[in-house]
Amino acid sequence: MEQKTTITVARGDGIGPEIMDATLKVLEHAGARIEPEFIDVGEKVYLSGNTSGVPDEAWESLRRNKVFFKGPITTPQGGGYKSLNVTIRKTLGLYANVRPNVSYDPFVKTKHPDMDLVIIRENEEDLYGGIEHQQTPEVVQCLKLITRPGTEKIVRYAFEYAKKNNRKKVTCFTKDNIMKLTDGLFHKVFDEIAEEYPDIETEHWIIDIGMAKLADTPQDFDVVVMPNLYGDIASDVAAQITGSVGLAGSANIGDNVAMFEAIHGSAPDIAGKGIANPSGLIHGAIMMLVHIGQAEIATKIHNAWLKTLEDGVNTGDIAKGGASVGTMAFAEAVIERLGQTP
Ligand code: ATP
Ligand code: MG
């Protein structure tokens, strides 16, 4: 029996606990060699007076285990609560956000049946540095920070990702016709690093027309790399046009620690009802298994999940007006199909 990898798990807020329990059950039945260590972060911690939402013992667990599997978190409104996601990304140096966006035609309704792209978003720099000032009572300013080391890291990550995952093309989006220094540096570094990967096709688009093309003909894109803010917007657009925000997972990668989650939020409107789609978190888990060297278990779960969709088992968000099942029943349907291929 191979040794188990201890992972830090936060069940999260809203629908978090429901989809996490369902996902962990799938992982257990699939034979994932993991040992969850649970931490409390998010709403409860914020409301106890900790404005970061992350208590000291949670940081210790994250630094020790280096793999974080996270349910969605609710940041309470108002009152100076800091976004837990931003805090975790910055503190643990999670520089790359990786979001695969795939359509599952005809099982999930979409206008883009052939879509299969991966957005790689720089996660620490750009306008997210939190460098904002009030200049005068009527003028405020936010600084855009792009560094060569930060850009080299994310661009290289994108090319290495493409190489490992047998992807053919890497596209870069910037607005370097206007921001000649900041976005200009990002584009320049992209061109430099592209030369080291002669087998991979490359292209650059100005973000506005690039984004428009991505929304219209997403099948023309493969791996797409860009600075933080553009990546934030592009990854939501890409997820939405696959047909449902309930389906996709994401990875936040750093040199020492990596975090895996669903792309959607805590969905307070449907929390506690047992109807949320666990698929986004299941996809986060699949990426986590690949990261910790258990790709064969990841494939087994992915195949069972595809077979579940193929067999017409749907949660309410993707049911197209037909019959639907709840969160746990969906997970059980995946478990029944472990070992089957779509
Ligand atoms: P946050 O601020 O935490 O990002 P949000 O307001 O942006 O949250 P989500 O929580 O992602 O939004 O929810 C957006 C909509 O999608 C809601 O109507 C929610 O019910 C629905 N939704 C999100 N995730 C799921 C899911 N896993 N299954 C079904 N519906 C979902
Ligand atoms: Mg949101």
Image (spheres, helix red, strand yellow):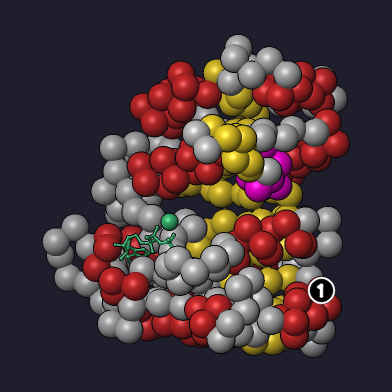
What x and y, as percent, mark residue 20? Answer: 50, 79
The answer to whether one can see residue 328 in this image is yes
**Extreme residue toward the front, this view:** 137
The mark total stands at 1
Magenta region includes residue 317: no
Asked if residue 125 is among those painted magenta in the image, a careful observer would answer yes
Label 1: few (<14), some or many (≥20) within 10 Å? some
Res 318 quadrant in image: bottom left
**Residue 239 at x, y = what percent?**
43, 47
Helix, strand or loop at label 1? It is: helix
Q: Is residue 109 above or below residue 299?
A: above
Q: Amino acid at mark 1?
A: Arg
Of 215 and 320, nearer the camera is: 215
Q: Residue at (62%, 49%) from the top-left corner?
A: 98
Q: Is residue 163 left or right of residue 30?
A: right
> Is residue 116 at least partly visible in the picture?
no
**Magenta region's main secondary structure?**
loop
Q: Based on the displayed image, in which of its 4 quarters is residue 264 positioned?
A: bottom left
What residue appears at the point 28 percent right and 71 percent down from the top-left corner? 269
- Residue drawn where x is 83% and y is 31% of the image: 148
Q: Is residue 89 above or below residue 159?
A: below
Q: On the image, numbered disc 1 is attached to which residue?
A: 63
In the image, residue 67 sits, relative to residue 191, either above or below, namely below
Q: Residue at x 58, y 35 (%)?
A: 136
Q: Percent x, y for residue 15?
A: 40, 76
Give, as a single range, the part of the protein colored magenta: 123-130
Rendering quadrant holding ligand 1: bottom left
Provide residue 54's location: percent of width, then percent of height: 66, 76
Q: Is residue 99 left or right of residue 255?
A: left
> In front here: 13 or 338?
13
